[in-house]
Amino acid sequence: MSFSRILLAAAAVACLAGSASAQTPAENATQSPPPAGGGMGGGGHGMMRGMFTPEERMMLMVDMHKATATMTDDQKQAYRKQQRQQFMAMSDADRAKYKADLDTRWAALPPDQKAAIQQRMQDFMAKRAQGDGGGQ
């Protein structure tokens, strides 16, 4: 599977992870967790942007790519579902810790690696905007 297809799969996982507004972790801590059904109001468009910063999204996609590199398509689908369920089961505090871990790992990457990841994301998004579907 091409890298762009894996990025698309990772984006789908993050989109399906549930909806949350772009609030600070302290504001999110006062709210109840999203519904177990996925909270897909509005068709799921843009939820990943509301939940994660661009850097966090890139780390999620890097993690997904590494975790699913040797899997079949069916295994990848099952893995994405399992990851989504784990994320949905997290408390607000656990989600905040998860996001902080993503931020810390992004900050620890060397600049050349960050630039390469950012370029791949830009290429992926450009293909997707052209209707290519990210290489599917």
Image: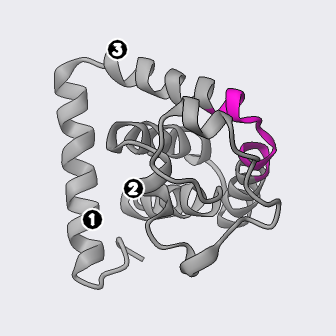
Q: Choose mark 1 or mark 2, whichever is in front.
A: 1
Q: What span is in magenta?
A: 85-95
99 or 72, nearer to the observer: 99
**Numbered circle sitting on residue 125:** 1
Colour theme: one colour
Q: Earlier in the sequence, mark 1 or mark 2?
A: 2
* Element class at badge 2: helix
**Numbered circle sitting on residue 108:** 3
* Element class at badge 3: helix
Q: Is residue 111 left or right of residue 52?
A: left
Q: Position of residue 129 (x, y in %)?
A: 25, 77
* Residue 16 location, quadrant: bottom right
* Element class at badge 1: helix
Separation (CA) of disc 2 from disc 3: 22 Å
Density class for disc 3 (Cα within 10 Å; few <14, some 14-19, many ≥20) is few
Q: Choose mark 2 or mark 3, whichever is in front.
A: 3
User: Which residue is depicted at the point 82% across and 60% down?
Assistant: 36
Q: Residue furthest bottom?
A: 131
List the residue tagged with mark 2.
Answer: 3
Q: Where is 80 relative to 70, above or below?
A: below
Q: Position of residue 26 (x, y in %)?
A: 56, 29
Give amino acid for label 1. Met
Density class for disc 2 (Cα within 10 Å; few <14, some 14-19, many ≥20) is some
Q: Position of residue 111 (x, y in %)?
A: 18, 22
